[in-house]
Amino acid sequence: MVFERLSLLADGGTENGGYVTLWISFIAVALLVFVLLKAFKPKRAAGEEGTTAESAKKWTITAEEVVLTRFRPTKFKEGYDQDQVDDLLDRVVQELRRLQEENESLGLTRGNPRRGPVSVGDPIITPEQLTSQKFTATRLREGYSQADVDDFLAKVVAGLRERIAENKRLKGQFAGNGHS
């Protein structure tokens, strides 16, 4: 029964069947165009970001984001050695967490002058070390997509620089209050 009605609608055998088929086709094509436009939307390059507060927030990166990041694997294309990339990102996570804790301590101390001294640690990795990092290329074995890793590391460098700048600003405020 249902199949007979559907075939009548598809054949235009009823009075409004042709119109229903036409509308369904129109909606399907419109959805397909929308999905294709969404899928092929060009991405912004790193240098195209503005200097507004909104765009600055896009660059901020957390240790959790680094931990959750996954890169496309490569097998037949040249990629980066996975162990080397993972080791570097482990150091980045440690540095982001160290800076976050230090910045929180400096912020709390600034708000409460009676609070004890803030321990300041040495950097685990610097933005300069990140930008100069070289990875062994992989061929005919699985690696990480070079483009994915390079793009992500550019974001990490920018986020790390933001955290370091915030750290210096807080230390400057802290020193200005007569603490050392």
Image: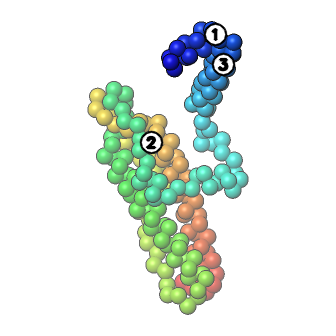
- First reached walking from the N terminus: tag 3 or tag 2: 3
> Is the C terminus in the top left, top right, bottom left or bottom right quadrant?
bottom right
Nearer to me, 66 or 28: 28
Nearer to me, 38 or 120: 38
Name the kind of residue labelled 1 in the image.
Answer: Gly
Residue position for label 1: 12
- First reached walking from the N terminus: tag 3 or tag 1: 1
| Marks 1 and 2 close (CB-CB < 8 Å) | no
- For label 3, the SS is helix
Distance from disc 3 to disc 2, alpha carbons, whole Å, reads 49 Å
Depth-wise, is mark 1 or mark 2 nearer the camera?
A: 1
Depth-wise, is mark 3 or mark 2 nearer the camera?
A: 3
Would you call the spot at circle 2 few (<14 residues within 10 Å), some (14-19), or many (20 or more)? some
Distance from disc 3 to disc 1, alpha carbons, whole Å, reads 9 Å
Residue position for label 2: 149
Judge whether 113 appears above or below 136 on screen: below
Residue 39 % position (x, y):
57, 30
